[in-house]
Image: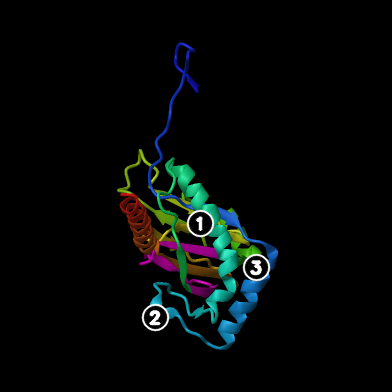
Amino acid sequence: MAKNEKGTEVKYQVLQWGPCIVHLKISEDFQTKLLKGAEIARKQKKDFRSNLAGIIKEEYAYENRKDYVNEIAQFLTVYDAAYQKWKSEEYKVKPEYILNSLWVNYMKKNEYNPPHDHSDFLSFVIFLKVPKEITKEQDEFVGNSAGPGSLSFLYGEGNRQSITYQSVKPKERDIFIFPAWIKHYVAPFYSDVTRISVAGNIMDSVKISQVRLANELAAKNAVTLGAKDEGK
């Protein structure tokens, strides 16, 4: 409700627009688990840079993605609930997800991620270690963006009457889940420190689910028809 110039209350609704991006916090236990896995990937030098857009020297693939599926699945459940509420529409067929890739970024001074998108259905990024020096840079930054080390999402044609980007200052244990197709980038920072983040891509097997559902309905109808035939 809002009041017009005459003081009369007016009921209104704002239509949702653009992509659905969900921000959550992971637990300290999951943070520790991911950090341990990251160090293993680093020691084994599972270089993942050839698959990525980042201007970052240390990006490594996790060895066993399945070890993290249970925790990530819980966040996707929350994302699904948020998405349906955001769209004001329930899923006709609930998506089934596959963790397609999982990697760690050891981001250092002057490194950055240029604007890019991903080829899968959903993507996420988790910030495991955020040195206080980066936070200090952001607090001292003078400008319209979130500043050094910020994470930004871009959408739309840039009309100033619209919100066409979101820029955030990541904190430790933040996780952001977003449609893989949305353009995003990470600004550089200038302190001689290392920030550790984990990112991943999620495939959606909803089409396979729809095929299976169609087959189940067809089988059910066939049984029903058969029962009617027997009663003749």
Give the residue type at disc 3: Gln
Query: Which residue reaches farthest bottom?
Result: 44
**Residue at image mark 2:** 50
Question: Picture coordinates of residue 213 (x, y %)?
Answer: 38, 58
Query: Which residue reaches farthest top?
Result: 6
Is residue 108 covered in magenta?
Answer: yes
At 50% from the left and 73% from the top, the residue drawn is: 102
Majority SS type along the magenta span: strand
Which mark sits nearer the N-terminus, 1 or 3?
A: 3
Q: Which residues are magenta?
A: 102-126
Tag shown at residue 31: 3
Q: Is residue 137 visible?
A: no
Which mark sits nearer the N-terminus, 2 or 1?
A: 2
Q: How far is disc 2 from disc 3 in space, using C-alphas?
A: 26 Å
User: Does 19 sit above or below residue 67?
Assistant: above
Q: Horizontally, is 65 left or right of 213 in the view?
A: right
Q: How far is disc 1 from disc 3 in space, using C-alphas?
A: 25 Å
Q: Horizontally, is 196 left or right of 232 in the view?
A: right
The secondary element bearing badge 2 is classed as helix
Give the residue type at disc 1: Gly
Q: How far is disc 2 from disc 1 in space, using C-alphas?
A: 27 Å
